[in-house]
Structure formats: C-alpha cells, structure tokens
Image: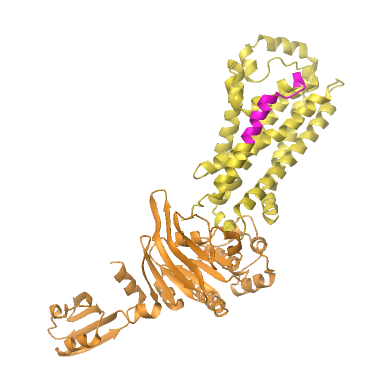
Chain colours: A yellow, B orange
Amino acid sequence: MNIYKHEFKMNFKSVIIWSLALSLLIFVFMSMFSTIARDAELLNEMMAKFPEELLMAFGMAGIDMSTVLGFYGLVFTFCQLCIAIQAANYGFSLVSVEERDQTADFLLAKPVRRTRILTSKLLAAITGLTITNLVVWISSYLFINMFRDGRAYETKPLLLLLLSIVMLQFVFLTVGMLISLLVKKVRNVTPYSMALAFGMYVMSAFGGMLGEDKLEVITPFKHFEPNYIISNAAYDLPLVLISLSFIIISVAGSYMLYTRRNIPSAV
Amino acid sequence: MSIIEVNNLTKYYGKSRGIVDVSFNVDEGEIFGFIGPNGAGKSTTIRLFCSLIYPSGGYAKIFGKDAIKHGPEIRQEIGYLPSEVYYYDRMKVIDLLKYSASFYIKDCTKRLYELADIMELDLKRRIDDLSYGNKKKVGIVQGLLHQPKLILLDEPTSGLDPLMQQKFFNLIREENKRGVTVFFSSHILGEVQKMCNRVAIIKEGRIIKIGEMKTLQKDNYKKIRVAANNVDETRFSVEGVSNLEKDNGAIRFFYKGDINVITRLISEYEVSDVTIEEPTLEEIFLHYYE
C-alpha cells in the first residue's frame, strides 16, 4: 500500500493536467458543434469534394457532421490520441524512471518482492488513468448536452465509445511497460510514448486510406474506431480481442522480465 | 554463525566480467573490510547481496538464507548504503525517510529522529535542494533507521566532510558493539584499517587475499629502511625481500621471513639508522596489486 500511495502522489499532478487538457479539448470542440451543424449541408458538400482517401486518413469518411454523435466521434478520435499518449507515458515511465533517476537502488533494496512493486506501480498508474477516464466521461456527457442544440442522439453508441477508453488505456499502458523492460535503458520517456501513440495512429489512418486490412490487426486505434462503434452501435469483437491479447501478453511478459531484471548501477 | 556466506559467486554482465568465483564468510559481529580499486567488483558483490542483480553462478547466503530466494525476508534486517545516493528529488527529507520506514515491520520513528539528530540533518528540506554530502546523510539515516542486523556499506564516506565521517564511523562502531555485522567496501585503505577486523582484497573480479587485519599487517611483512655507508643493495637480495630500492645512501625494502636473517645482514654494515615498521595497509595493498 505504501508504494501505491507514493506512486500515486508522484503521478497526481500529471493526471490532473491531462484530465483538464482533455476536458478543455472536448469543451472547445463541442462548443463549435451548433455552428457547424447548422451549416452541415454546406460542410458535407464540401467534404464530399475532398478525396475519399484523405477523409479516410482522418477517420472522417462517412461521417455526418450534422448529427451529435457524428461530430462527437471526430472529437473522440483526438481524445483517443491524447489518452493513448498519456497511458503510454505512464507505461514507459513505470519502471524506467526509477532506473533513470537511480532511485531503483533505494526501492529494490527494501524488503519487498518485485512483483509487489510492479503490481503497486501498475495499480497506481491505473488509478491515475481512471481519474482521467472519469473526467472524460463527465466532460463528454456535460458538454454534449450543453451544446447539442436540441438535437437528439442515441445513448448506447456513446456509452460504448466511452467504455472503450478503458481498454485503450490498458493497451498503451501495458505495451509501453513491456517495451520499457525490453530495452536496456529509457533515457527519456516522451519520444517513446509519442512514437508508439502516433505510430499506431498513423498506421490506423494509413490503413484506412489504403484500405489495408492487415494493419488494423496491429493498431488499437482501429480496434476501437469511433466510426465503427457509432454506426454499428457495437464493438468489432475480433479486433477488441486482439487488443485484449496485447494486454495479457504485455502484462505477463512484464512480470517475467521485471522479476529477472538486473538493475543497472549508478556508476 | 556466518552472517554472510558467499560461495563461488560469479556475475557476468553479458560478456563483461563482474566478479568471478568469489567465496568468503563474514561472521556475526564482525566489521569486514572489502577493498579493491574501482571496477574490481565491490559494488557488484554488494548488489548481489541485495538481489538488485542476479548471479550468473554460485550463491550468497545471508543469515543462512539464499539471498535471491528469501530476498525480501532478508532485507528486513539489512541496511544498505549505496556509493551513489539518489532519491526522489521532489520529496522532502522527512517524507522520504518515512516512506523508507514504512517498508519495515518495526516502528522506526524514534530511531529516525535520533539518527537525523546525530547526523545534523534538516528534515524539512527538499531532496533536490540538498548538497551531495547532505544527500549522503539522508542515505545513512535511511540505511540505519530500522536497526538492521547487517549493514552493507559501499564506499560510504565519499562526499562527507571529515567531521561527519568521524560521526559516521562512531555510529557504525556503536552499532557494531550492539552486535551488528558490518560489511564495509572501500578503496580508501586508511578507513578500512581503522574500522575492520578482517579484510578481503578483490582484484579484477577475483578475491586475491582474505585475512585478519592484524595478520595482514604483522605476520607477513616488515617495512625496513637501512641507512649505512657504502651499503650494497645486491647483498640484500635474499629470499623474502621485495621492493628493494636505494635512495640517498639508504635502502628500503619489504621483508617476509625470519627476522634474524635480516638483522644479521644489517649488522655487517656500519649502520647510521635503521627502522623496522609495520607496513600500512596501503603498502600491503599495492604489493598485492603488482
């Protein structure tokens, strides 16, 4: 419990900043909804002129911007990217920060098992991500209803969208953790998490553009694509299962690697 | 009873050598010195005791239990002071120490304040505002606050001013009087000489000598200087003489063996001055490193 508390405290500021940023993002975008929705005819016409590939790349193909969820789906895509970066950040730094700052010697010389250390750290990170998650839920609900301009929307697809955040967070958190344990030393977390999150995002975008199916197997952004969830009011189950297997493999692999890891010394 | 039992302990980092076939025992209540230059494998050995790293071969037992298998249990009773101290920069000293104390079953609060008082540590400051010497003090308090039965010191005095070093050594001696075993790694021989009962000398990952401080110093070597007219140093090239050198009409050498042989040799000359001394550990050490 002491490690959990300590870790949570160390992360708390970052959690608050990410949560507020996401809340602001949703607020700003949703506040534009009524204006855009009113000119939706025009906008849809304009978008129809763009090449199909480009729209696909940005996940905007087949979106009706005049509907609440159509528009929110677009906003949600950006949220997903931010959430992924945050989760990957926590994943990459989970163990590596102690080694980079050389505090690992302090912690690991204490009478605790490494499995307990990793579990506590993981739970603390999950707690932080869940706080962000809740803020996104509340902000989404609040700002959608604040700015929906009297237009109706279905609750189920929205709920499914919001629920998918948990899985997305877990994938990036655990994959980040696994990669950080596979490499010898993570000097700086940001390049890693950016590379992972943007890499996956671009892969998802290009996959859409090229109509390439194989890529969608790899990238979690495809597993939880807002368009699919909104238009089908359901998850693409086989793809979700791929994400789930990523999580299981990463967690198992991380525990295996961490309990066998030689902690590099300061000098 | 052996507090530390090391048997053929070996550690390779990939292909590069850490330590090779290291074996020794440390008994209860000892202050055991572990000396060698940088890179000889001192830290590697201590890090293996704390299971910060895992051995490539052999084993280390502490309190009679395998250091890896029973790691957490053993570490309840180990106090470890690493050579380089790094702590969570954003924490206050007192919060770090309380965090440290929270890992132990015992209540450490009283001892925490006692130690902070002895080491003159300002508890309210943030870690990143501390000088290196002050961080080192945090390390000392952190390593001793749970009153461990075994203290592992890895070059503990670097960064401490002489006054603090003195306080630190007194603290360690007091702990030792209470029956605490101390494993003291250092490359500063003077402090090992002052503190330790027994020493092991490590070179390029291998133990090259283990012995009582006293026997290392006394029974083996004498440091002899003879000042005499027309002294012929070749005459002194007998068995047991080493490091023979001549300067300003005097000769100096180390001698191991029957002291009568050498005194007879010396008496052949018209001697103006003779000194026969115990070599310092430094000199013994250099001898082993040749």
Total label count? 0
Query: Which region is colored magenta?
Result: A230-247
- In this view, A117 is above or below B178: above
On whether residue A240 falls in the magenta region, the answer is yes
Q: Residue furthest right?
A: A150
Instruction: Determine the main secondary structure of the stretch shown in magenta.
Output: helix
Of B37 and B61, nearer the camera is B61
Residue B283 to residue A241: above or below: below
Instruction: Give the residue at x 63% y 42%.
Output: A90
- A62 lies left or right of A110: right
Q: Is residue B226 magenta?
A: no
Which residue is pictured at 70% across the width and 43% down the height?
A126
Q: Looking at the rendering, in which quadrant would you find the N terminus of chain A?
A: bottom right
* Residue shown at the point (73%, 12%) measured from the top left: A44
Residue at horizontal 54 percent and vertical 67 percent from the top: B64
Q: Is residue A88 visible?
A: no
Query: In the rendering, at what x and y percent does residue A246 appear?
Result: 62, 34
